[in-house]
């Protein structure tokens, strides 16, 4: 999408985007699930982010709608390197795979458009669940989504956010792994951190995971 007349740098817009996302999350948690429509939630984020960067009279509502739709498509998302290989390895082991994501309902379209839906037994968004990571209730709901009775102690969550993915899962009774090459204030166990997806795939294929 090409936007004409934008003022300011891309980094300025990105910083404002993060600030406004955080503000909207505090005012209307979980994409406004209990207060406003999720589409309006995103339109407000777009308006607040770009209002000082667009020409006077610019139609931020239409722009917001366009961005909302564009971000359902593959032109706005890339599959992380090694993801297909990792999912294939896990699938071949006969292990059920699901998605637990702090996302709005577009996630279903996004995964479909990226060709990833075929790998998952369930897809659980925070918007549909009503709770977002690291709240233990979203992890509890994920267990109910499994086709077979599954205990938290039998489940593994893989993510890239220390608090939401690793700590949230562990405090919910799950095993957890973190994909990150950044140092954290509260580092997880050394064997629970992988610098990239490829290294995690190797550990799984060679049965070298250490989850305790």
Image (spheres, helix red, strand yellow):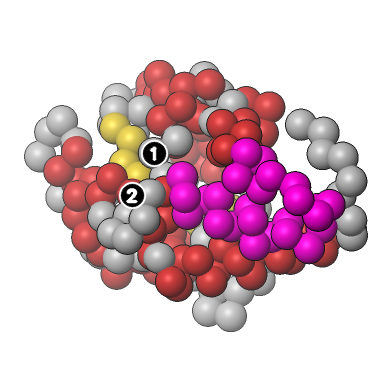
Q: Main secondary structure of the magenta part?
A: helix
**Position of residue 183 in the picture relative to residue 135 (left or right):** right
Residue 143: x %, y % from top left: 19, 46
The single residue placed furthest to the bottom in the displayed view is: 185
Q: Earlier in the sequence, mark 1 or mark 2?
A: 1
Taking depth in this image into account, of 108 and 190 the one nearest to the observer is 108
| Residue lying at 22% horizontally and 60% vertically, measured from the top left | 137
In the rendered image, is residue 147 in sight?
yes
Asked whether residue 44 is drawn in magenta, I would say: yes
| Residue lying at 44% horizontally and 36% vertically, measured from the top left | 107
Q: Callout 1 environment at 10 Å: few (<14), some (14 to 19), or many (20+)?
A: some
In the rendered image, is residue 85 in sight?
no
Give the quadrant of residue 146. top left
Q: Which residues are magenta?
A: 39-64
Taking depth in this image into account, of 103 and 197 the one nearest to the observer is 103
Residue 208: x %, y % from top left: 46, 45
Residue 10: x %, y % from top left: 84, 55
Q: Callout 2 environment at 10 Å: few (<14), some (14 to 19), or many (20+)?
A: many
The reply to whether the C-beta atoms of the residues labelled 1 and 2 are less than 8 Å apart is yes
User: Which label sits on residue 105?
Assistant: 1
């Amino acid at each position: 999408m090409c936007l004409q007349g934008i003022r300011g740098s891309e980094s300025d817009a990105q910083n404002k985007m993060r600030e406004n996302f955080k503000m909207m999350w505090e005012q209307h948690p979980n994409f406004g699930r209990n207060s406003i429509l999720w589409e309006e939630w995103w339109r407000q984020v777009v308006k607040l982010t770009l209002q000082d960067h667009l020409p006077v009279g610019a139609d931020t509502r239409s722009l917001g709608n366009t961005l909302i739709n564009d971000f359902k498509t593959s032109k706005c998302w890339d599959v992380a390197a090694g993801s297909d290989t990792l999912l294939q390895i896990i699938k071949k082991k006969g292990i059920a795979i699901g998605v637990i994501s702090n996302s709005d309902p577009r996630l279903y379209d996004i995964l479909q458009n990226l060709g990833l839906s075929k790998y998952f037994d369930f897809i659980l968004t925070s918007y549909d669940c009503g709770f977002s990571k690291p709240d233990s209730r979203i992890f509890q709901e994920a267990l109910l989504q499994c086709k077979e009775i599954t205990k938290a102690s039998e489940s593994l969550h893989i993510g890239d956010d220390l608090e939401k993915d690793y700590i949230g899962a562990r405090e919910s009774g799950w095993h957890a792994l973190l994909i990150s090459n950044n140092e954290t204030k509260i580092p997880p166990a050394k064997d629970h951190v992988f610098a990239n997806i490829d290294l995690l795939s190797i550990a799984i294929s060679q049965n070298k995971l250490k989850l305790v």
